[in-house]
Amino acid sequence: MTCKTCTATSRCRPTCRPRSTKTSKRPLASLRVLGIDPGLTRCGVGIVDVTATRKATLVEVAVIRTPADMPLEQRLLHLGDEIERLLDEHRPDAVALERVFAQHNLRTVMGTAQISGVVLHQAAKRGLVVGLHTPSEVKAAISGYGAADKKQVATMVARVLGLAELPTPADASDALAIAICHAWKRGAAVAGPSGALTPAQGAWLAAERSAGKSAPKRRLAP
């Protein structure tokens, strides 16, 4: 799942994205989450379907790239258009975004914040609540270790999704990890601004309740 026409250090055309892998059919009672690892030069996006039993399936993964010498407003416009395309094409039930945190590189954190604003705007137009997750929160959810490195995260993402190879570059695997983290931690608890659940979220909640009722109860030792 690496880009076939450019590398992470090349000046790619704004339309250059890695090839994606799509599922043919959406699982019943599943939650579809769009995860985004925000960045101006490389913005990772990953979409997964997750069932109430926590089984995750890959829908699409990509890295949206813009060259550093492109005017800022044009970079944001292109990234916004691509995110809008993904939202309209795949119709996720929720959006998950890496939370902006303080860095020594002010320029980097500013770019991350600007992309985050674009995502929040696009999600709000569709009545979707965006879940914000810190890097350590995502790492802990996907690997059980809040200080996991990039390779460990990618390895666990591939294992959870049943992929034959690690999703690369790191922006892609991070976006998928964010989406999986959000589904596992929030699930049907994420409702739109009106407080109503989407049909998929309602089905997820019903499946979780059903699974809870059918699960054997633990007995305390005397």
Image: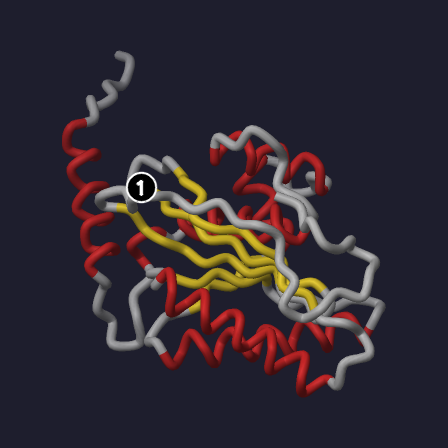
- For residue 197, side relative to residue 24 (left or right): left
Judging by the rendered image, the residue that carries numbered circle 1 is: 51
User: 155 or 138, which lies in front?
Assistant: 155
Q: Residue at x 47, y 35 (%)?
A: 161
Quarter of the image where the C terminus is located: top left
Please name the amino acid that badge 1 sits on. Answer: Thr
| Position above or below: 126 against 140 | below
Q: Residue at x 70, y 63 (%)?
A: 42
In which image quadrant can residue 90 be found?
Answer: bottom left
In which image quadrant can residue 200 be found?
Answer: bottom left
- The extreme front residue here reads 5
- For residue 116, side relative to residue 190 (left or right): right
- For residue 193, side relative to residue 184 (left or right): left
The x, y position of residue 144, in whole percent, is 57, 35
| Position above or below: 60 against 86 | above
Quarter of the image where the N terminus is located: top right
User: 75 or 221, which lies in front?
Assistant: 75
- For residue 18, side relative to residue 200 (left or right): right
The x, y position of residue 94, in whole percent, is 38, 61
